[in-house]
Structures are given as C-alpha cells and as structure tokens.
Image: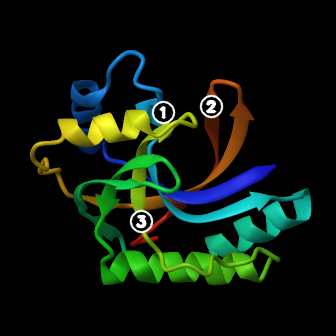
Amino acid sequence: MRLFVGIPLAAAVIDQLSATSQQLKSDGDGLRWPAPALWHVTLQFLGNAGREQYECSVARLRELRLPPVPIRLEGLGFFDRAGIFFAGVQVSPELLLLQERVTKATEFCGFVPETRPYQPHITLARSKGQRQGLFELKTKIHRQPNFTRFVAEEFVLYESFLGPAGSRYEVRERFLLGGR
C-alpha cells in the first residue's frame, strides 16, 4: 500500500481552483493536470506500508484530538525544480500543529518524518519532463486569485495507485477534527 495523509478541500475551493485551471490549461502544454477529485493538502507522505504499519497508523491517528483547522489559500506558485504548479496554503498555527501531530503519530509506526520545512500546497499541474509548459503557464498568470477560506473538519488517510495516466487516490480512513 502506498499511503499519505491529507486534508480534502471544500467544494467552493474545488470550484474556484477548477475555474482557474480551466483558464490556464491549454492543449499540448506538456503538463499533467490532475482531476479536481485528487486535490488535497498533504500533511504527510508515508510511502509504502504493510498491513501492520497501516493498522498502527490508523490506531495512532484515531487518538489525535485536535480542533478544526482553518485553511487559507495564498495564491499560485511554482516549484521549478520539481516541475509543479500549485496553489499555496498558509501555514497557520493550527495547520502546523496538525501536521506535527500526524507526523509524530505515524513516526511511532515506523514512518520517517520529512526533514524539509512543511510547505503546504495543492498540486494543480505537473510537468511531464520538459519545462516549457511551466514557463508558458507562468506568462498566463497576470494576477493572483482570491480563494475562499474554509475550515477543515477532518483529515484523511489516502491510498495512492500509480498508473500511466497519473495517480488515483482512494480514501482508506477519515479522522474527525473537533467535537467528538
């Protein structure tokens, strides 16, 4: 199983990101645009896991007691070296606390925490190898959109399946935030 933990997006945010993507997308741009159903804010990429690690992670994540998390998108950006076009997410104290607690919980199950600083984002497109598509995409962004804020009431353990057309994700477990 290939796993990660993330926050699903509110419907209003998905609609806004879809409209933005449609305006910027063009045929033959050399970019892979994931379906809106795949968009999320990653808390931790776990990677390959066996049944024991999966069950341990579910049990540990169920123990977390944290308040709902306000999510605010900050604008569009690029990770040039990775060939990624994204919508940035503000690092609020609540989001950082959730990310740290998720990482600590899964570390107990044998998953290694990321050493780079947490940089939450929503991946909107990936380069298929050549960077020309990203360069052209940058020239199309004339102003930053204002996105709807939302409050995350849950986080999710996803399983990722890799395929020739890209990844697809399935929800394995949902974990509520706030009043339980």
Dot 1: element = loop
Pick out the residue farthest to the top.
27
**Residue 166: image tag:** 2
Which amino acid, by three-letter code, is at mark 3? Pro
> Which badge, 1 or 2, comes first in the chain's sequence?
1
- Answer with left or right where residue 43 lies relative to residue 12: right
Residue 32 at x, y = what percent? Answer: 50, 30
Q: Residue at x 83, y 59 (%)?
A: 49
Which amino acid, by three-letter code, is at mark 2? Gly
The quadrant in which residue 157 appears is bottom right
Q: Residues within 10 Å of mark 3 (few under 14, many from 20)?
A: many
> Which badge, 2 or 3, comes first in the chain's sequence?
3
The quadrant in which residue 133 appears is top left
Residue 137 at x, y = what percent? Answer: 29, 36
Dot 3: element = loop
- Answer with left or right where residue 105 lies relative to residue 131: right
Viewer-side residue, 103 vs 30: 30
Distance from the alpha carbon under mark 1 to that under mark 3: 17 Å
Residue 158 at x, y = what percent? Answer: 63, 50
Question: Could you tell me if the residues under marks 2 and 3 are in contact, i.e. CB atoms within 8 Å?
Answer: no
Q: Which residue was labeled with disc 1?
A: 34
Q: Which residue was labeled with disc 3?
A: 120
Viewer-side residue, 90 vs 172: 90
